[in-house]
Image (cartoon, rainbow, N blue to C red):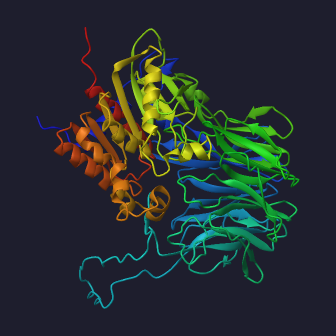
Amino acid sequence: MREPTNRCLWAMALAVALLAPPAGAASAEPFSAGDVFQLAWATSPQLDREGRRLVYLRHSMDMMRDQPQASLWRMNIDGSEHRPVVTGPDSVSSPALSPAGDRVAYLRRDDTGLQLFVSWLDSAQTAQLTRLPWAPQGLTWSPDGEWLAFRMLVPAPAPAVEDVPVAPTGAQWAAAPVVVDRTVYRADGSGSKPHGFEQVFVLPAAGGSPRQVTHGDFNHTGPVAWAADGSALYLSANRHADWAMDTQNTELYRVDLQSGVMAPLTDRQGPDKEVTVSPDGRWLAWTGWDDKGMGYHRDRLYVMSVAGEQRRELLPDLDRSIEHPQWSADGKHIFFYYDDQGDTHLAMTDLKGRMRILARDLGGKQLGRPYAGADYAVGGDRFVYTAVTPQAPAELKAGRVGSDRLSTLTTLNSNLLGYRTLGEVRELTYPSSFDGRDIQAWVVTPPDFDPQKRYPLLLEIHGGPFANYGPRFAAELQLFAAAGYVVLYVNPRGSTSYGEEFANLIHHNYPGEDYDDLMSGVDAVIAEGYVDPQQLYVTGGSGGGTLTAWIVGKTQRFRAAVVAKPVINWASFVLTADQSPVFARYWFGDMPWENPEAYWRRSPLSLVGNVTTPTLLLTGEEDLRTPMSETEQYYQALKLSGVETAMVRVPGASHSIARRPSQLIAKVAAILGWFERYAPTPVD
């Protein structure tokens, strides 16, 4: 019988996962692959100026088109009048509620592409404001509600081979050669970058012609903030001569809308971004950092006058990365969120640096794995945010400044997950065998877990590497647990949410002692007595795939491994990935030809001669972040070394390999199928 191809294996795994009936009682079935199509989650809440009315995006899965989709909903801050604004097969994105709360602007596709629409919430009328050749982005209302600002690509001519004759009419010549002359010329998820630059435009909210207000051969890609009187915009951009190589060095600018004068407000080496204007128009708040060439820099919070004076840092002793600052309605406080030990906190500070935590359970925007990521909004003395638990993806919660009470506004998954038995998620802290540092991890146990039994252990490793896992819902890990595995996921050194020193322990040293952190976690779970030490399995994606390949090159204790979208050879990665200037500058310092030994000694390919573990490779064919060539190198190296291996190539998938629901399901099925192939023969 002919062996099935990897694409056949992928399709067979998906079919089995979808069609197999879940086990257990009808009222408490385990979470199953088909349930992925039924999940829903909330993002992008927007509050009006008074904090009375909100809109948000409700995400779900379109099973027939195999795509996530988003509709626009509204409600009052107390949860009443919860009803749709825009629904249908075409997704809504980038909602922006007007300051008065009477209109909402958003992007939606028409026959030409993404366009700008506005809906009136009281009358349910909708107007399409644009028919543009390129999609507008970053919609922002003026304080008086009369204008909208947005970013859009302004195309430029592409280079071409000169003096090529024109094909005769009706001739079928080959496509013209493509000339590449840019340092960063493609992006994961979207492919080749169009020629041109992102510029900022303003548009009357009642409709009319967009007017371009920034110019030059520079990209203006950050959020845009309006001056309180509507006379100017504040934005972030990299307008330095070496912007193509020094990609992080952005500054803040003020753009006068009458004269068009663009004045810089900052001048340091490093990013200045996420600018926001106080309601009285006197102050700016923003985030950024001084570039020290490290692999990780934490975002810090700053304030200054709109004239660029009285500049100072707030909360310099908060050793966490501060994100998405927003002013309170009275201008006396700044809201923000930050990750801390695997959790995401919503907090506020006054201008003297006195901080208060408002909520500790932000997150839930990532369905597959338990990564950080959250949205929030403020208005009046109220705030609303995306909240997460290990048992459900993002729901909306609301609170009031001065009160500890938080109210749940949505329960989008109660009719599904309320009738599923999920794996229990438990925190675990243990010392690393390398230096005794405390390492934080979480253990997911199978439904109906019995500590007197012995279970197989699945170590799942996060990517980044500067990222963090936490006690957040993760469909992939719940499916692993439902298949009978104890799942261990860890924040080893290099993870964020523990401070700059902890993250930069892997600076120019990755993979490194994070291997010891992971192995110590495996030992800690085995010591609890419910894991069979002869049934250990390991997988991870991106940086987690790199670490998985590193692990099987250093130990033979795992029965099988699945390496997803990895870096295998750091030199080839830096020279083929979509963000080469960032990786070379911050992750190595030297170019591959300047210090080849530094690149090689950290490459899993250097350890391939030690590998005996059966290893499956899993990567999207359109991945430009960790290109398919990395996977292909490792596959051939394993084959040449006589290691049992297979390569699963996912058609149409970028680095976000599980973005579509069927891809998430089939990814899990392929991993479980590989591990089952190498499980010990059951004893009767």
278 shown above or below 633: below
| Residue 302 vs residue 395, the one in the foreground | 302
Q: At x 26% / y 28%, what residue is drawn?
A: 677
Q: Is residue 122 visible?
A: no
Q: Is residue 667 above or below residue 286?
A: above
Question: Looking at the picture, does residue 107 appear above or below residue 315?
Answer: below
Looking at the picture, how far across and down is residue 420, in whole percent? 52, 23
Residue at x 73%, y 53% (from the top left corner):
325
Res 597 → quadrant: bottom left
* Residue at the (38%, 51%) spot, across then down: 653
Q: Position of residue 68 (x, y in %)?
A: 50, 46
In the image, taking residue 213 as reference, residue 516 lies left or right, namely left
Give how far across and how far down residue 363 sits, in percent.
Answer: 62, 40
- Residue 530 is at least partly visible in this image: yes
Q: Quadrant of the N terminus?
A: top left
Observer-nearest of 480 and 394? 480
